[in-house]
Amino acid sequence: MLEHRIESDRRSDDVDAVGSSHFRAAILPAEAEPRVAVLIPCRDEEATIGSVVEGFAEVLPHAAIYAFDNDSYDASAERAAAAGAIVRNVSRPGKGNVVRRMFSDVDADCYILVDGDGTYDPAIAPQVVAMLRDGHDLVNVARIPVDHESFRSGHALGNRVLGTLLKQLLGLTLDDVLSGYKGCSRRLVKSFPVVSEGFEIETELAIHALQLGVSVCELEAPYRPRPPGSTSKLGTWSDGVRILRAILGLMRHGRPMAFFGAIGFAFGITGMVLGVPVLTGFIHTRRVPRFPTAILATGLEILAAQSFATGLALDTVSRARREHRMLAFLAVPDGFAGRREGDPPAAQGQR
């Protein structure tokens, strides 16, 4: 009788175990594919937007392709919709305003940001997604011109100058930071406070990644000239000045001690150079000089001390802002959590 009861209990436990395993299999969904969003800002690009949408749809068949029309005067929105894109309109002009709307409205696991002018190669997009899946948060696609018409001479010179400035001032190691073809992780996008309104948005995004200390990489891809009927919206001098101002502004906010320290050093050296003759005359004559050079030298030294003090105070504020950005970055779930190849089940559950 006792043996029969033990055997009955064992069978009941086996049935419960099988039933619970089937129940767990029923309520736990199979691992879903990552959601990829291709974001295409465009303004008056009816000659190219259709082919851009179709090119990315071909290489990323499961991606959601969005075309954000920046109040175009032509048929850009209609061409994008006909090619299969999800079309939305942003009336406020400026690429930065469009990107701000894109990043806030679209929810995905990874994002590919690309211009709608037909100059970038869609074939590289799967590799960008793979690099994001491997753990990179920003993938910058450096442009390799296929001929001399791809880059205007002014654009090429400005790109080199601004790239060198970013490397020297901020330590950014990307070769083509102004490229409009980038891959971004969900965490980077959702923690990015877009401030820029124009084409300086690419620089701001790269510096945001640099300040967070996240994984940034770069790969090269061919860069084609614009097809006939398509014109560039980028002004060589006007947008170059705006980008330069943005770099200085980002340095002022991101590295205030270096920024104001350099200004204070310049004031201090200038004041010393002007003050040496004044001090020499005082030593020889034992009389306080009254000419304007003494007043100017003293004023410059006061400004130098104020600049150093300002940089020191703002550096504390900047450090707190970086910590808040990092907390915002860490608060966003990783879009590829549990989907990276080679991760054991325990590690997948901990992401």
Image (spheres, helix red, strand yellow):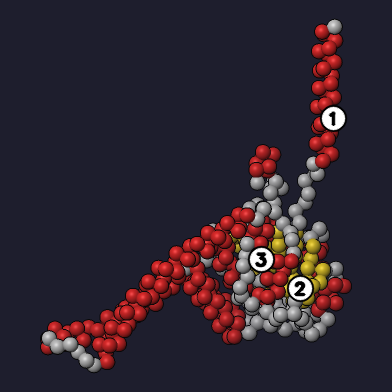
- The residue sitting at 19% across, 83% down in the picture is 279
Compared to residue 172, the image places residue 196 above or below, namely: below
Q: In what quadrant of the picture does the N terminus appear?
A: top right
Element carrying mark 2: strand
Determine if residue 112 is in view.
yes
Q: Nearer the viewer, residue 44 or 193?
A: 193
Q: Earlier along the polypeptide chain: callout 2 or callout 3?
A: 2
- The residue sitting at 81% across, 44% down in the picture is 29
- The residue sitting at 78% across, 49% down in the picture is 32
Disc 2 packing (10 Å; few <14; some 14–19; many ≥20): many
> In terms of image quadrants, where is residue 207?
bottom right
Disc 3 packing (10 Å; few <14; some 14–19; many ≥20): many
**Residue type for callout 2:** Phe
Q: From the top left corner, tell me how far across and down residue 74 is, in percent.
A: 81, 84
The residue carrying mark 1 is 19
User: Given the current orientation, which residue lies at the most extreme top position?
Assistant: 1
The residue carrying mark 2 is 68
Q: CA distance from mark 2 to mark 1?
A: 50 Å
Horizontal side of 235 relative to 1 (left or right) equals: left
Compared to residue 93, the image places residue 134 above or below, namely: above
Q: From the top left corner, tell me how far across and down residue 6 is, in percent.
A: 81, 13
> In terms of image quadrants, where is residue 21?
top right
- The residue sitting at 44% across, 73% down in the picture is 259
Q: Which mark is residue 200?
A: none
In front: label 2 or label 3 = 2
**Residue type for callout 3:** Lys
Element carrying mark 1: helix
Q: Are marks 2 and 3 in contact (CB under 8 Å)?
A: no
The residue carrying mark 3 is 182
Q: From the top left corner, tell me how far across and down residue 182 is, in percent.
A: 66, 66
